[in-house]
Amino acid sequence: MSQAQPAVKKQRMDVKTIGTHDGTFHCDEALAVFLLRLTEAYRAADVKRSRDPVVLDTCDIVVDVGAVYDESNQRFDHHQRDFQGVFGHGFTTKLSSAGLIYKHFGKDIIATQIGVEVDHPNVHVLWLKLYKEFIEGIDAIDNGISQYSSQEQPRYSNRTDLSSRISWLNPAWNEAFTPEVIDSCFANASRLTGDEFLGRLRYYANAWLPARDIVLATLSARYSEDSNGRILLFQRFVPWKEHLFQLEAELGIAGDGLPLYVIYPDETGGNWRLQAVPVSPDSFVSRKALPEEWRGHRDDYLSKLTGIDGCIFVHASGFIGGNKTREGTLNLARLALKCND
């Protein structure tokens, strides 16, 4: 029995410590701590919450406190006056501790979670996507950066974002609490941020990324349906808009080489859809809307108008239409390409 104790003591001495500030906690350091615990180096780390420099000096890594950003010494604060760190890659939002930890450790975390090497191209794609859709908003809120430049008063209050939900986990101002109680609240907050991060990562890895692969393959094969590559034919529906615009930018597709129409099966009704590509992902304006004379017409009248059997409808704005068959929908797209309006 006496011989086992030194091994236990040595094991505890080997446990690393993550330092962050005590008192009221925020979403950024709650997430930063969770992310660190997804790494090999800090997987079993303890957490010390303090503002005492003597205590923080004993920690292996410190986040969101200490007024030092020094990767070589594992210090990651963003509150110092001269700090202007950003994620890069086109992102200009000032980093919080969440963004700092994600910037330096995110690729390793993603690679481990999806089971690939860190230099796999999917890791970089997911790293950027998660920053854009999940981390950047946390950085901005913690640094007091508004989502909009407008000076108008908001029409309604929204306190359901992750940063707001984390703030509600702090003890109330008039609630008596001990350091142990608030540390327990912080642990709950860290788990909540982490659960949402991992959920988002799973979705992007298992649903968003496969859709991107399908869009890329369809984009590469577009000349098989039209000699100028203006028609994309999907064999099943996928969320395509965001991926199409991103891939066009990455591949340098522009001008006359841009796809104008997308065709995909309507899996709920067994029919096919023809959709005009918008000028931007969120725009209602199409690169080339379906012909004006087709718009608002349906069924047999539309088939007579176009000379194509199986027509179902064309929307009044010309952004989408339908046909009962794949070939009929392709013929609609090819005919629409010949129209000048």
Image (tube, rainbow, N blue to C red):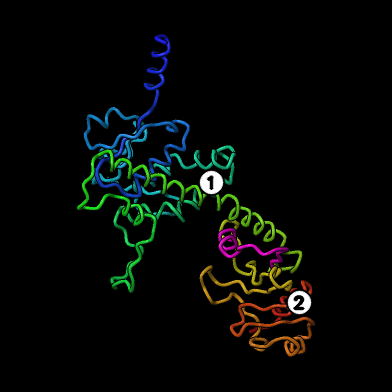
Task: Give whichever of 89, 48 is nearer the camera.
Answer: 48
**The label number, if any, that marks residue 324 in the structure image:** 2
Above or below, 194 against 261 in this view is above
Separation of residues labelled 2 and 1 (CA atoms)? 40 Å
What amino acid is labelled 1 in the image? His
At 59% across and 74% down in the image, what residue appears?
Answer: 287
Q: Quadrant of the C terminus?
A: bottom right
| Location of residue 244 by image quarter | bottom right
Above or below, 285 against 79 in this view is below
Task: Give whichever of 250, 314 is nearer the camera.
Answer: 314
Q: Specify whether 179 is left or right of 126.
A: left
Name the outermost residue toward the top. 3
At 27% across and 40% down in the image, what residue appears?
Answer: 21
- What residue sits right under mark 1 in the picture? 124
Q: Is 145 colored magenta in this rendering?
A: no
- The mark that comes first in sequence, 2 or 1, is 1
Q: Which residues are magenta?
A: 232-248
Q: Specify whether 117 is left or right of 190.
A: right
| Location of residue 239 by image quarter | bottom right
Element on which disc 1 rests: helix
Q: Is 245 colored magenta in this rendering?
A: yes
Circle 2 residues within 10 Å: few <14, some 14–19, many ≥20:
some
Element on which disc 2 rests: loop
Circle 1 residues within 10 Å: few <14, some 14–19, many ≥20:
some
